[in-house]
Image (cartoon, rainbow, N blue to C red):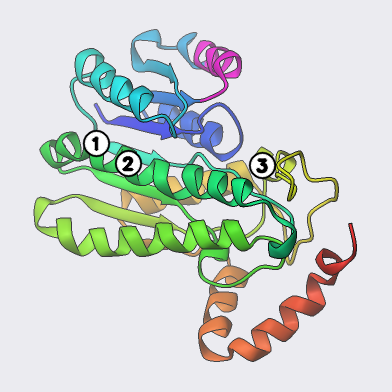
Amino acid sequence: MTRVLITGAASGLGWALAQRFFAGGADVILVDIDRQRLLERAADLAAAAPERIHHYAVDLTDDKAVAELIAAIEADIGGLDVLINNAGITHRSLACQTDMAVLRQVMAVDWQAPVALTLALMPLLRASRGQIINIGSMAGWMPVLGRAGYCSAKAALGQFFETLRGEIAADGVSILMVYPSFLDTPIETNALGGDGRPAAHKRSTVGSIRSAGWMAERIVTAAKKRERRLFPDRLTWFSSLLWRLAPDLYQHLMTRKLASELEPR
């Protein structure tokens, strides 16, 4: 039986992934900071097969809480086959109008937490010759106005795990980096403003906004094939290519498409 741990599992893409892995026969370990929503989600799945559901309410930026989570997984489950680092937050605010506390929070959740959790779970993943799936973003490859902190965190995530990939290749642990574009998930609904309060303006987007279910299906398919990277649509792939080959053109197009981000708030 495949054992899959998903962070940020109580909503959005994390919940869509939990449903699909569970439907595929996996034991699913749900991890989220929202205890009430987590209990509801666990109950939804447990109605069909309670023995295949485990859930832990954890603040992944709390080192002590993460250590307790690792101990619980070892005691309750005994191993792990797939780790999905999905939990994340974002902000919508210009860099010069964003408190450092907000930038630190985004970096802590989107980079530090998945790195710390992965390293702590590495013995279990090595034992199972398992798989790590990281939900990155096209913002990790190219700049996006109003998301300087988010872009930085996702870029750091990609660089860390691409380096780790080479270091653990001999252990049989594979890494899938997922680079979605704009998704219809609560991460944007709950985006922070520059002062740490909820962002007051709606997000600017480019291209189609995909559903969490659409994205989850593609991730599950890529995971089965043990793929290394997933650019799920042509816009994501083309934008990353444009940024690398013609960065000035990309900057011009981005500024035009996301001009509303530059308006006074």
Residue 201 picture location, percent across and down: 85, 50
Whether the magenta-drawn stretch holds residue 203 is answered as no
Instruction: Kindly identify the residue that appears in the image at 44 percent across and 50 percent down.
Output: 111
Type of residue at label 3?
Thr
Type of residue at label 1?
Ala
CB-based contact (under 8 Å), mark 1 and mark 2: yes
Quadrant for the C terminus, please: bottom right
Work out how far the residue at label 2 is from the one at label 3, CA to CA, in angstroms: 24 Å
Residue 9 picture location, percent across and down: 50, 30
- Look at mark 3 in the image and give the residue it sits on: 185
Q: Is residue 103 above or below residue 29?
A: below
Q: Circle 3: is it few (<14), some (14-19), or many (20+) Cα within 10 Å?
A: some
- Earlier sequence position, callout 2 versus callout 3: 2
Nearer the observer, 195 or 136: 195
Type of residue at label 2?
Ala
Q: Is residue 148 above or below residue 107?
A: below
- Look at mark 1 in the image and give the residue it sits on: 120
Determine whether the residue tagged by mark 3 lies in a helix, strand or loop.
Answer: loop
Instruction: Kindly identify the residue that appears in the image at 32 percent across and 58 percent down.
Output: 161
Which label was assigned to residue 116?
2
Residue 98 in view here: yes
Residue 27 in view here: no
Q: Which residues are magenta?
A: 33-44
Instruction: Kindly identify the residue that appears in the image at 51 percent across and 64 percent down.
Output: 140
- Earlier sequence position, callout 3 versus callout 1: 1
Q: Is residue 101 above or below residue 21?
A: below
Work out how far the residue at label 3 is from the one at label 1, CA to CA, in angstroms: 28 Å
Residue 136 picture location, percent across and down: 48, 55
Work out how far the residue at label 1 is from the one at label 2, CA to CA, in angstroms: 6 Å
Residue at the far right: name it: 264
Determine whether the residue tagged by mark 2 lies in a helix, strand or loop.
Answer: helix
Asked if residue 176 lies left or right of residue 203, the reply is left
